[in-house]
Image (cartoon, rainbow, N blue to C red):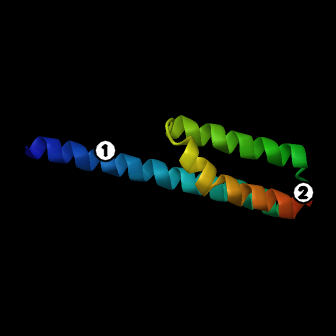
Amino acid sequence: MGNRDGLEQYEKEQEGKKIRRLQIMISMVMSVIGQDPNLTVEEASELVAGAKRAALAMFPDKEFAYDILYRPRLQRLMNERFRIQ
């Protein structure tokens, strides 16, 4: 029993690390989109698409979660930065 508990703890820690990596990546993408004055809308769109690809590579079955947690924030930032309607 103790061995299985250790494995579960390890898996939880790994999941936590992946979640933190995802949060850092999204933060970095948002910083670049919000702060790089030379960034084009095309480049920003590619950053957003790349972030989604990376997120789904880390969490393959979580597209819905990505779409409700991160997509609206990125969309809002794109709208503000590039005045997209």
* Discs 2, 1 touching: Cβ within 8 Å: no
Residue located 81% across and 45% down the image: 45
Estimate the x, y position of residue 31 in percent, counting from the top left.
73, 61
User: Relative to the observer, which residue lies in front, 33 or 62?
Assistant: 62
Residues under labels 2 and 1: Cα distance?
A: 42 Å
Tell me what residue is drawn at x 57 percent, y 42 percent.
63
Relative to residue 25, is residue 35 drawn left or right?
right
Local crowd at mark 2 within 10 Å, few (<14), some, or many (≥20)?
few
The amino acid on which the numbered mark 2 sits, given as a three-letter code, is: Gln
| Secondary element at tag 1 | helix
Tell me the residue at 69%/60% (across/down).
73
Give percent across and percent down for residue 76. Answer: 77, 61
15 left or right, relative to 67: left
Q: Above or below — where is 35 with respect to 55?
A: below
Residue 79 in the figure: left or right of residue 59:
right
* Residue 51 placement: quadrant: top right
Marks 2 and 1: which is nearer the front? 2
For label 2, the residue is 85
Q: Amino acid at mark 1?
A: Glu
Q: Left or right: where does residue 16 sit relative to residue 85? A: left
Numbered label tally: 2
Mark 1 surroundings within 10 Å by alpha-carbon count, few (fewer than 14), some (14 through 19), many (20 or more) = few
Q: Which badge, 2 or 1, comes first in the chain's sequence?
A: 1
Along the viewing direction, whichever of 84 and 38 lies nearer the viewer: 84
Residue plotted at (51% across, 42% down): 62
In the picture, the disc for residue 62 is: none
Using the rendered view, name the quadrant where residue 78 is placed.
bottom right
Q: Relative to 73, is 21 above or below?
A: above
Q: Position of residue 2 (x, y in %)?
A: 9, 46
Using the image as rendered, state which of residue 62 and residue 38 is in the foreground: 62
Residue 47: quadrant of the picture = top right
Mark carried by residue 11: 1
